[in-house]
Amino acid sequence: MVEVELLSVAGCPHVDAARQLLNACVEELQIRAHIEEKVGAYPSPTIRVDGQDVMGSPTVLDAACRLDTSTRERVLAALQRKVGETS
């Protein structure tokens, strides 16, 4: 099972889109994933697969809106990489 985190700050206007993207990618790959959502002082939204930010390390690690929001290609690639490691 793939471990995924969706990190956000409270009230982030982009977290719903990130959640939908993440769920769509998991469904497209037909994999089992444990998705944990955390709200706190994070660059928001952030999607991490096995602890690794799918967009690379953000330049700011404080609570802030991210301008480099996760893309479908990056989320799929991160999930596929992890699935390849465990099979």
Image: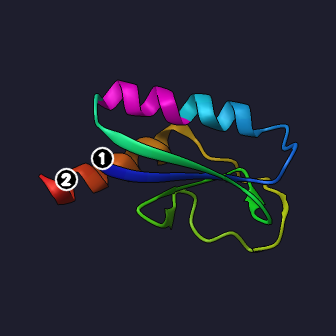
Foreground residue among 50 and 81: 50
Q: Is residue 59 left or right of residue 32?
A: right
Q: Which residue in the protein does label 1 denote?
A: 80
The magenta span reads: 22-29
Q: Identify which residue is drawn at 75% across, 64% down.
A: 42
Amino acid at the residue labelled 1? Gln
Say which quarter of the image contains residue 59. bottom right
Q: Identify which residue is drawn at 85% across, 49% down.
A: 10
Q: Is residue 31 above or below residue 28?
A: below
Q: Residue 82: horizontal and vertical position, in percent?
A: 29, 55
Look at the magenta stretch and give its main secondary structure. helix
Q: Identify which residue is drawn at 31% across, 31% down.
A: 29
For numbered disc 1, what is the local secondary structure?
helix
Q: CA distance from mark 2 to mark 1?
A: 6 Å
Q: Is residue 55 above or below residue 25?
A: below
Q: Which residue in the protein does label 2 denote?
A: 84
> Do the residues bearing badges 2 and 1 touch, measured as CB atoms within 8 Å?
yes
